[in-house]
Amino acid sequence: MTTTTETPRWFTSSYSDNGGACVEVAANLAASHGVVPVRDSKVPAGSTLRLSPTAFTSFVESVKGGRLGA
């Protein structure tokens, strides 16, 4: 059995206003590892949330639909 290690490729949304309240996402791990890591862009060495692809998609749709409070 071959094990591969894939490095997260972090990116910040192009919709970010770069005001410091940004998150970074490494969507490249969704298919291969079944996880979408999310972290605070100001603290890249800090904690990382590990969301399932389904949970991440639901979150993004909620944001787009304005269903999350400010």
Image (cartoon, rainbow, N blue to C red):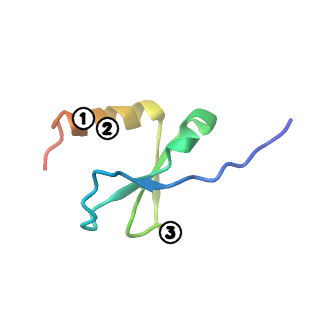
Label 2 SS: helix
Residue highlighted by disc 2: 59
Spatial CA distance of label 3 from label 2 is 23 Å
Residue 29 rendering spot, x and y as whole percentages: 57, 42
**Marks 2 and 1, Cα distance to the nearest angstrom?**
5 Å
Q: Which residue is mark 3?
A: 45
Task: Identify the residue shown where x is 31% and y is 38%.
Answer: 60
Q: Which mark is residue 62?
A: 1
Q: Residue at 22% across / 37% down in the picture?
A: 64
Query: Which residue type does callout 1 highlight?
Result: Ser
Tag 2–tag 1 contact (CB < 8 Å): yes
Q: Position of residue 2 (x, y in %)?
A: 84, 39
Left of 57 or right of it: where is 48?
A: right
Which amino acid, by three-letter code, is at mark 2? Answer: Phe
Sequence-first disc among 3 and 2: 3
Q: Report the front residue among 68 and 7.
A: 7
Residue 70 rendering spot, x and y as whole percentages: 13, 50
User: Badge 1, how many Cα within 10 Å: few under 14, some, many 20+?
Assistant: few
Tag 3: amino acid = Ala
Residue 9 percent location from the top left of the image? 55, 53
